[in-house]
């Protein structure tokens, strides 16, 4: 008897996805599967096409070759904006730079899309927005404007804004990269709770410890191809690819100290060698 | 301590504007002393109601011109932002032609191009000169406003579009709910500036025979026929325009502060 895992169709499936900007190939044949309820992390060096994969999934970018399916939607075949809008109603997206609407209050930021796009009533949308703000521990800032919030607070509001559309799937695009180390924690806590509730999440992240802790599946990309994928334990504890091993060695622990330059004239302790006349 | 507090405490109103107050009282005293005896000031007082009516005409022209210009400019600006080249091209031509033409030429153009009356069916509707001048000013205003509008839209970061698209907004919805409201604040200062410039441009109306404040001043100076009166009346026109345009810039600043959300 086959296990549940093999029977269930993946919610998102990418096959041999190719995309290039002008003559610059960014994705060179990506295969990726996300099952319902899974948390999938995509790790890898900058410029390896991680964010581009997410933008393809939500239809912000159109791949040139390959197939991309979200649920029953064949995303690579979508030709009209109206069809992509239908897709985006089901897929949430959280950006690195939060991208909240600065002219709207926190509550309005959460209410506007459900009201205008999904046609919900104001009362219903506001009620749900307040519940979501409580969930990300931002209910006390409902009437503040994004400009008055810290980065971590803005990012939590952005997550709540994506959740307000009741998506089947949320994509997180390096959501903690613009935050200082102290506020990273508060955002990661929110994401961790989401994954524990069974929300399907795809994360592009540079937080290796976090990815290891919450992910079911981890993909390692480099130069537009998937180098290796597997369970979090497998990738982080026993990576098979040499490139993955090297990347993780740099990303985790080993800070990669540069050897000191001998007689560096700019090093303060070497200044004594120069006679200073004031 | 005492020194600190005297530095930080806001200076009382009369002390802050000491120079202006002094100047104002001197001017008032001078006027009070000379006004009853001076024939120049007597004539000015005599002509001031006519000047006020003339200035009313200027304000009317400027208000109608900026309204017309803004509505037209909004349309032209929206066309200029269209993804279709066929729609962008006429908008670009409109903007370039009317932004680079001297206003006086446009005013002469509209004055002679339009008939003095239009007949709709059997009724004749007169088309007064001041309305032609207004249209002549509305044309460059629309071209300038289109550029202000296009610039404001362009200054909204593309990430706002991306964020709104990811929330399944349509292009029209993004424009109306996300981009336009953010543009208002950015457009306000250049728009008010444009209005001030248009107001000063209304002085050209006298050249095509509109009875505005300049025209009235000319008639007055010809009638009174005193060099000093001519100097005084044009000086008072300067003050009149300043008194009208300066508060506009003050209001702009206040509005800007009020709508500052980031």
Image: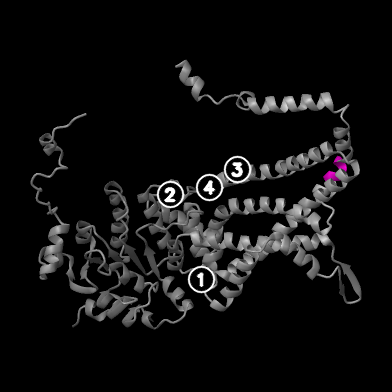
**On screen, A98 above or below B32?**
below
Picture residue at 90% right of the left edge, 71% below the top: B124
Foreground label between 3 and 1: 3
User: Spatial distance from mark 3 to mark 1, Cα to Cα?
Assistant: 34 Å
Q: Report if residue B68 is visible in the image.
A: no
Pointer 2 residue: A139
Check the residue under mark 2 and report the chain it is in.
Answer: A
Check the residue under mark 3 and report the chain it is in.
Answer: B
**Which residue is at the front of the view, B260 or A199?**
B260
Check the residue under mark 4 and report the chain it is in.
Answer: B
Labels 2 and 4 share a subunit: no
Give left or right: position of A171 versus B57.
left
User: What is the residue that sits farthest to the left in this orientation?
Assistant: A262
User: Spatial distance from mark 2 to mark 4, Cα to Cα?
Assistant: 23 Å
Pointer 4 residue: B260
Task: Report helix, strand or loop for mark 4.
Answer: loop
Within 10 Å of disc 1 (Cα), the crowding (few <14, some 14-19, many 20+) is some
**Which residue is at the front of the view, A232 or A99?**
A99
**Which residue is at the front of the view, B14 or A153?**
B14
- Residue A276 position, x and y percent, is 17, 32
Foreground label between 2 and 4: 4
Within 10 Å of disc 2 (Cα), the crowding (few <14, some 14-19, many 20+) is some
User: Spatial distance from mark 2 to mark 1, Cα to Cα?
Assistant: 29 Å
**Res A272 → quadrant:** top left
- Residue A241 position, x and y percent, is 11, 70
Chain-order first, disc 3 or disc 1: 1
Which quadrant, please, contains the N terminus of chain A? bottom left
- The circle drawn on residue B170 is 1
Highlighted range, magenta: B48-52
Q: Majority secondary structure of the magenta segment?
A: helix
User: What is the residue that sits farthest to the top in this orientation?
Assistant: B2
């Amino acid at each position: 008897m086959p296990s549940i895992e093999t029977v269930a169709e993946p919610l998102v499936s990418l096959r041999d996805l190719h995309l290039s900007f002008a003559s610059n190939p960014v994705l060179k044949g990506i295969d990726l599967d996300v099952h319902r309820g899974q948390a999938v992390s995509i790790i890898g060096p900058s410029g390896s096409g991680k964010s581009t994969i997410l933008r393809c999934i939500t239809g912000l970018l159109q791949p040139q070759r390959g197939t991309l399916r979200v649920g029953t939607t064949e995303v690579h075949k979508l030709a009209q904006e109206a069809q992509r809008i239908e897709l985006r109603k089901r897929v949430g997206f959280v950006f690195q730079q939060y991208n909240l609407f600065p002219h709207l209050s926190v509550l309005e930021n959460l209410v506007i899309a459900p009201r205008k796009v999904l046609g919900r009533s104001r009362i219903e949308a506001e009620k749900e927005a307040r519940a979501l703000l409580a969930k990300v521990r931002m209910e006390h800032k409902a009437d503040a404007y994004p400009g008055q919030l810290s980065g971590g607070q803005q990012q939590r509001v952005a997550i709540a804004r994506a959740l307000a559309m009741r998506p089947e799937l949320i994509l997180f695009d390096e959501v903690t990269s613009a935050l200082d180390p102290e506020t990273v924690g508060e955002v990661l806590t929110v994401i961790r709770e989401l994954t524990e509730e069974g929300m399907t999440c795809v994360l592009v992240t540079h937080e290796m410890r976090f990815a290891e802790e919450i992910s079911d599946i981890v993909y390692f990309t480099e130069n537009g191809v998937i180098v290796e994928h597997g369970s979090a334990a497998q990738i982080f504890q026993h990576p098979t690819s040499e490139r993955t091993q090297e990347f993780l060695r740099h990303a985790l622990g080993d800070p990669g100290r540069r050897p000191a330059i001998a007689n560096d004239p700019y090093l303060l302790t070497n200044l004594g060698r120069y006679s200073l006349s004031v | 301590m005492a020194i600190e507090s005297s530095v930080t405490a806001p200076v009382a109103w009369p002390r802050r504007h000491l120079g202006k107050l002094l100047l104002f009282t001197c001017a008032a005293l001078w006027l009070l002393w000379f006004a009853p005896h001076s024939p120049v000031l007597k004539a000015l007082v005599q002509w001031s109601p006519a000047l006020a009516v003339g200035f009313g005409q200027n304000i009317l022209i400027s208000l109608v011109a900026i309204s017309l210009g803004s509505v037209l400019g909004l349309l032209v600006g929206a066309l200029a932002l269209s993804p279709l080249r066929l729609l962008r091209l006429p908008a670009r031509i409109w903007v370039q032609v009317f932004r680079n033409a001297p206003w006086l030429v446009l005013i002469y153009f509209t004055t002679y191009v339009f008939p003095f009356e239009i007949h709709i069916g059997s009724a004749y509707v007169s088309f007064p000169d001041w309305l032609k001048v207004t249209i002549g000013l509305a044309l460059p205003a629309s071209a300038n406003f289109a550029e202000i509008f296009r610039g404001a839209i362009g200054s909204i970061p593309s990430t706002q579009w991306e964020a709104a698209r990811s929330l399944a907004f349509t292009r029209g919805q993004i424009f109306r709910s996300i981009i336009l409201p953010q543009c208002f604040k950015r457009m306000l200062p250049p728009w008010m500036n444009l209005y001030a410039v248009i107001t000063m441009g209304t002085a050209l109306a006298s050249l095509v025979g509109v009875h505005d404040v300049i025209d009235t001043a000319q008639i007055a100076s010809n009638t009174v026929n005193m060099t000093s009166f001519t100097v005084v009346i044009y000086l008072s026109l300067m003050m009149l325009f300043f008194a009208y345009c300066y508060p506009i810039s003050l209001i702009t600043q206040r509005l800007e502060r009020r709508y500052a959300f980031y």
